[in-house]
Amino acid sequence: MMGINRKVWAWALYDWANSAFAVIVMAGFFPVFFKDYWSGDVEDTVSTFRLGMANSLSGLVVVLLAPLLGAIADQGGTRRRFLLLFAVMGSAMTACLHLVQQGAWELAIFVYAAATLSFSMANTFYDSLLSDVAPPERADAISSLGYGLGYLGGGLIFALHLYAVIHPDTFGLADASEAVRWSFISVGIWWIAFSIPILLFVREDKPATSPRGWNAVTGGYRRLRETIAQIRQLPQTVYFLVAYWLYIDGLDTIVRMAVDYGLSLGFGHESLLTALLITQFVGFPFAIAFSKMSEKIGSRNSLFVGIGVYALATIWGYFLSEVWEFYGLAILVGFVQGGVQAISRSLYIRLIPHEKRAEFFGFYNMLGKFATLFGPLLMGWTSMLFGSTRISILSILLLFLGGAYFLAKVDIKEGERAAAAFSSDLTGTKS
């Protein structure tokens, strides 16, 4: 396919690996199972608060750790090692959810938060390896390949487990709860098994000298302080990061709140999970197609298209009343979800200095985690203020409009020149 070599396929397969966690655990089974199994003896508002606390806790830790660990990895050439560490930890914590007994919501929250933290941290180092496998002119296509494989792989394993939940007797399982519990072990195995290729076949550029031990930590703090001070020298990158924070906030909020919103409208669990499955399979071909569109109209214009579709989906969500409409929204979101994420990743890597990829992707994922803190809070505050869940959906429009505004300010060519000059200055300092 497109002359893609072994290391590109190995890199892209990590999207296939971790998407099982994203779709089955984060977006699918865990929110529903937490309410019904681990926290089923309290009001829905209490269980929602507990789940929100878990997401906020893991998000806060990522905000604090991602830039620092990125700085340490950049100076030591250890991005693959950090990726392995967090992939192993995340898959192990996911499998451990199988062991959490009914009603033990505190333990479920802790294990889930640890798995979510590992997922986010591993993505920091995975994203930063994109430039090690993709030349700039092919970054959009290869980034989109990763997301496309992620949607396909996540969709396949999710379809299997959704069938097992609906028909547990086919697999010799007692009930749907047992099917969900076994899915956690399956996801853990899937995640780590398909992480092996990137560890075997992707190599990263390493600096001439690599500090170790405490020197690596202190060096990481120093590099982090330098980056915070120096990022002002890259105004186009700053504009993009602000734009990304806003529109990815809207995107993530829709993904995380869709099932909860559907439940509030009275739709059944099976219908909502089926809609999630539809998004996965629609997302696979359209993530690839999005990269083709970016070749025709450019990365920034492609992002404008994606943001516009999300704005349309948000307005449609306000008027939503039938299950078939929820399926229609799932298809509409599937058209652009993977593409927006993929093009954002590949565009960002063009706007940052090569020598600080992991560190800058630490900031990138830090903003993504801030998004998971702010977006649901905006929806909740709006819902309480107006007494309407439907109006809370419309509040997400502000995020997409703000993202489009700052994205319009990004001059990609100027940003690439500034990043290249920044890299030259860093190299000159070291030589």
Image (cartoon, grey):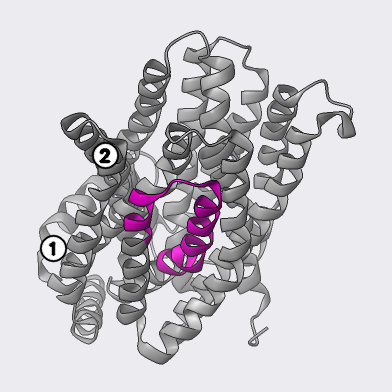
Between 67 and 152, which is closer to the camera in this rendering? 152
Q: Residue furthest bottom?
A: 296
Let me know if residue 11 appears in the view. Answer: no
**Span highlighted in magenta in the image:** 313-341
Q: Residues within 10 Å of mark 2 (few under 14, many from 20)?
A: many
- Give the amino acid type for the residue marked by disc 2 in the picture: Met
Q: Which residue is mark 1?
A: 230
Compared across the picture, whether 305 is left or right of 21 comes to left
Q: Secondary structure at mark 2?
A: helix
Residue 348: quadrant of the picture? bottom left
Q: Residues within 10 Å of mark 1 (few under 14, many from 20)?
A: few
Let me know if residue 388 appears in the view. Answer: yes
Label for residue 379?
2
Q: Is residue 146 above or below residue 424?
A: above
Q: Is residue 321 magenta?
A: yes
The structure residue drawn at horizontal position 22% and vertical position 51%, both measured from the top left corner, is 224
